[in-house]
Image: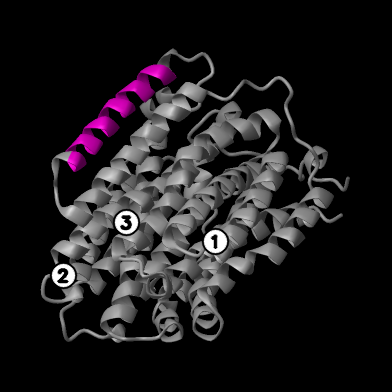
Amino acid sequence: MRPWWPLVAICLGTFLFLLDTTVLNVALPAIGTDLQAPLSGLQWVVNIYTLALAVLMLPFGSLADRFGARNVYVAGLTVFALASLGCALAPGTGLLIASRAVQGIGGAAMSVSAFALIGVVYRGPDRGTAMGVFGAVTGLGAAVGPMLGGVLTEYLSWRAAFLLNLPLVAGTVVLTLRVLGNDRRPRAHRVDLPGTVAFAVCAGALVHGLTRAGEDGWTPAGYASIALAAVALAVFVVLERRCAHPMLDVRLFGRASFAAVMLCVLASSAAFAALLFTSVWLQSDLGLGPVRAGLALMPLALTSFATSLVAGRTLRGTSPRLVVGTGLLLSGVGCALQSGLDATSTASSVALGLAVTGIGIGVMGPALSGAVFAAVPADRGGMAAGAMTTFRQLGPTLAVAVFGVLFRTGSGTAPAEGLDRVYVAAAAAGLIGAALAYTFVRAPARVAAAPVRRDVSTTR
């Protein structure tokens, strides 16, 4: 079996994971119409999924270290498929949101274990190449998703977007079991359950408080949720510092490079979160159908895909500080170009900004993935993968909640005004992230080339 077949299996699951997210962005207005769901309900269709991802990334990183990344990956694929069936059959918003939560559980297992498998299977320059391909697949999912979502929604149903996952998962599971061996570590430590619960309460309360603020303004209930999140965060830090084998070693944040990479991941999420509100604006305010809305979002998807295809290999010898910083700078500039919207704006008003943002995303993706491994000791690879994927999902969750407040606040006369505020905030996040990257991100140590790890990538 060729040594790159394991990467094919890993990337198939990643493509499926990202395809589902980008397809849904275009399908949301149709879901709202079919199920008579308000914007706040649609936010929860997105947020409950990303919240489950964010909460469970870290514990699944520990599970991947304990039970093997391949086993967690296959289990995640299976749960993801079953939940997708539940989403497709949901008769109302409540069951759809519940199924999306379960789908997020499977997605968390898939995402963190896929990232960890790259670190386990590939070494040296091979890892850089693998990260580049991984980033290209991310761009491909973003490129195909909007158009596919538009076609499925307009000519079939939004439910078809979820049913599509079933055959794709089946093929991915078969290939994974064939080309990836069992990497289980029997002596790995147990999952940090108290830390998981504290982190779940923190993330859930924070997102709930921000979402309530978007729905009802800042009420005592919203403030109480934010306060609960702060208390839960403090408890989480105390628990992790005292735990012999923590879910997340909080001392890693004492490493400036690691902390900077995590903040850069959060900043990079803003541009993705803004797409949800762009899709709502295109379809609800401008009256575009799902296919035309998908086409309007294609500049970001295509430039992200094209850039990520070459960035992993051509920029491999370039300092991550420069690559990540420039990517975030371009993302921020792209979002700034999309601001200034008003009631006379059209889909073409955001095309250039979307394209520039896509270039930035494509540039920084592979470098961010490599920088996180370089920022931690080798025995913390699974934990680092979990932390990065947690922040990668927590970022959009928080951004959607915050942007929901801005979108409603600014849309008293025209939705474009709310979207303008969203893009201003996304631009600020990109520029701040660029400053952090230029200042703190460090280059990885030089590692000699090494062949693929045969013990975890052989045919069973």
* Amino acid type shown at disc 3: Val
Location of residue 33 in the rendering, given as x and y in whole percent from the top left corner: 38, 75
Q: Secondary structure at mark 3?
A: helix
Q: Residues within 10 Å of mark 1 (few under 14, many from 20)?
A: many
Q: Mark 3 and mark 2: span between their CA atoms?
A: 16 Å
Q: Is residue 148 above or below residue 118?
A: below
The mark that comes first in sequence, 2 or 1, is: 1
The structure residue drawn at horizontal position 47% and vertical position 45%, both measured from the top left corner, is 52
* Amino acid type shown at disc 2: Ser
Q: Is residue 276 above or below residue 400?
A: below
Q: Count the marks.
A: 3
Q: Which mark is residue 400?
A: 3
Location of residue 446 in the rendering, given as x and y in whole percent from the top left corner: 58, 39
- Please indicate whether residue 266 sits to the left or right of residue 183 in the image: left
Q: Mark 3 and mark 1: span between their CA atoms?
A: 21 Å
Please indicate, yes or no, whether residue 381 appears anywhere in the rendered image. Answer: no
Q: Nearer the viewer, residue 425 or 304?
A: 425
Q: Nearer the viewer, residue 188 or 324?
A: 188
For label 2, the residue is 411
Frontmost of labels 3 and 1 is 1
Q: Mark 2 and mark 1: span between their CA atoms?
A: 30 Å
- Residues rendered magenta in the picture: 221-240
Please identify the quadrant where the N terminus is shown. Answer: bottom right
Q: Which mark is residue 174?
A: none
* Amino acid type shown at disc 1: Cys
Q: Secondary structure at mark 1?
A: helix
Residue at the front extreme of this rendering:
91
Q: Which mark is residue 87?
A: 1
Q: Residues within 10 Å of mark 3 (few under 14, many from 20)?
A: many
Frontmost of labels 2 and 1 is 1
Name the quadrant containing residue 342.
Answer: bottom left
Name the quadrant containing residue 355.
Answer: bottom left
